[in-house]
């Protein structure tokens, strides 16, 4: 399959990219890693008249410690997140999740902002952004705006981004000390999109859970936090009965669909199993378990 014809514009600055989007009058698309956009063009699911290549804009690929947060540039590749010592130190759950995204060749090209803007309902990065309360920095003709990841991800393949807006960075607030994490995913084959995946963090103080975060993907149109399960866990030690209650709550919060790969019932069962495993790992990894 070949893409429909398009005009190709190379932007050399954020302002130039935003101006090119505005000039395209709603018919332009940003080209980042191209790992989702090119298949969409080849299958004729998208027919933009202009592609605006942002790969040569300087200063859009970085991982920077800003004190209480880590700021990641829009063009930062998946493989850079996977191998960054800064990410490994502050967000090992994110580094681990990246190893489940596609294959190395794709991770060498795919970018953090591309994954978030594409918003595949089974993707790992949107789930991690929701887990970590990430905020997206967006350049628009009138200036800059910020939006929380959970508001940005509106629906499957649908985000809160106007036709003339460009994501420039993602801000990840650092986690409290004594935070453990777990990540669990099941896919049909290594490198496939997840049938379901769960990422969890537990912050422990005095042997009790002070803060719990559980995010899931592949089981709803957008990644979501299991807020009721999180609330159940706070103030308690992670005992087996509590894990069972959290699993039931996670399953209740999932809205999985049936497709060629798995039934809704299977995905609902699976997300509970994965949540239980992720919570146990998170509890162990913050040194709370014997
Ligand atoms: C075989 C295969 C397997 C894959 N498996 C997985 C997987 O298991 N898990 C997973 O999460 N992903 C998977 N992917 C997708 C991959 O991670 C993509 O790289 C990613 O989703 C998109 O990133 P990109 O930089 O390539 O974006 P592109 O393809 O360049 O763009 C994607 C969309 O985002 C828009 N966009 C890109 N950058 C910006 C920006 N800065 N501002 C505004 N809009 C922007 C584009 O216009 C386009 O609409 C797979 C891809 C392939 C080809």
Image: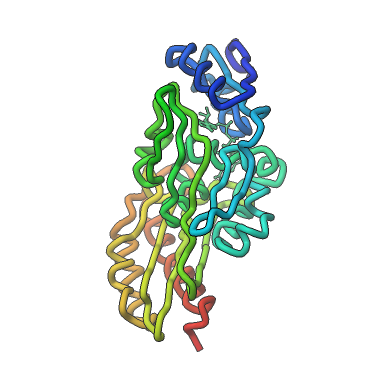
Work out whether residue 15 or residue 56 is closer to the camera in this orientation and state it: 15
Residue 198, above or below 210: above
Q: Quadrant of ligand 1?
A: top right
Q: Residue at x 56, y 57 (%)?
A: 94
The colour scheme is rainbow
Report x, y in % for residue 281: 51, 73
Residue farthest bottom in this picture: 290
Work out whether residue 135 or residue 106 is closer to the camera in this orientation and state it: 135
Residue 84 left/right relative to 37: right
Residue 8 left/right relative to 143: right
Q: Residue at x 45, y 26 (%)?
A: 165
Residue 91 visible from this viewpoint: yes
Q: Residue at x 44, y 71 (%)?
A: 279
Snapshot quadrant of residue 13: top right
Where the N terminus falls, by quadrant? top right
Work out whether residue 148 or residue 193 is closer to the camera in this orientation and state it: 148
Residue 186, above or below 146: below
Report x, y in % for residue 220: 37, 47
Q: Residue at x 49, y 61 (%)?
A: 174
Report x, y in % for residue 259: 43, 43
Report x, y in % for residue 233: 33, 74
Residue 195 visible from this viewpoint: no
Residue 98, above or below 282: above
Work out whether residue 24 or residue 169 is closer to the camera in this orientation and state it: 169
């Amino acid at each position: 399959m070949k893409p429909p014809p398009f005009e190709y514009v190379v932007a050399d600055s954020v302002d130039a990219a935003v101006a090119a989007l505005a000039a395209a009058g709603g018919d332009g698309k940003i080209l980042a890693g191209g790992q989702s956009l090119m298949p969409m063009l080849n299958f004729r699911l998208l027919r933009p008249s202009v592609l605006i290549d942002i790969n040569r804009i300087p200063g859009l690929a970085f991982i920077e410690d800003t004190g209480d947060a880590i700021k990641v540039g829009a063009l930062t590749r998946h493989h850079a997140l996977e191998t960054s010592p800064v990410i490994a130190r502050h967000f090992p759950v994110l580094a681990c999740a990246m190893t489940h995204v596609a294959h190395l060749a794709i991770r060498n090209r795919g970018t953090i902002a591309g994954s978030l803007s594409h918003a595949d309902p089974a993707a790992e990065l949107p789930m991690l952004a929701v887990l970590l309360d990430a905020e997206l920095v967006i350049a628009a003709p009138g200036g800059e705006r910020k939006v929380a990841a959970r508001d940005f991800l509106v629906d499957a393949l649908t985000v809160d981004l106007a036709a003339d807006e460009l994501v420039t960075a993602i801000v990840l607030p650092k986690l409290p000390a004594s935070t453990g994490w777990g990540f669990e995913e099941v896919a049909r084959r290594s490198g496939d999109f997840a049938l379901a995946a769960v990422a969890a963090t537990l912050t422990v103080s005095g042997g009790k859970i002070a803060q719990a975060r559980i995010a899931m993907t592949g089981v709803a149109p957008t990644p979501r936090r299991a807020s009721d399960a999180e609330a159940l866990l706070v103030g308690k030690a992670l005992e087996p009965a509590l894990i069972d209650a959290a699993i039931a709550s996670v399953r209740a919060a999932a809205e999985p669909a049936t497709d060629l790969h798995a039934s809704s019932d299977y995905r609902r069962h699976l997300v509970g199993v994965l949540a239980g495993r992720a919570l146990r790992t998170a509890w162990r990894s913050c040194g709370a378990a014997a």
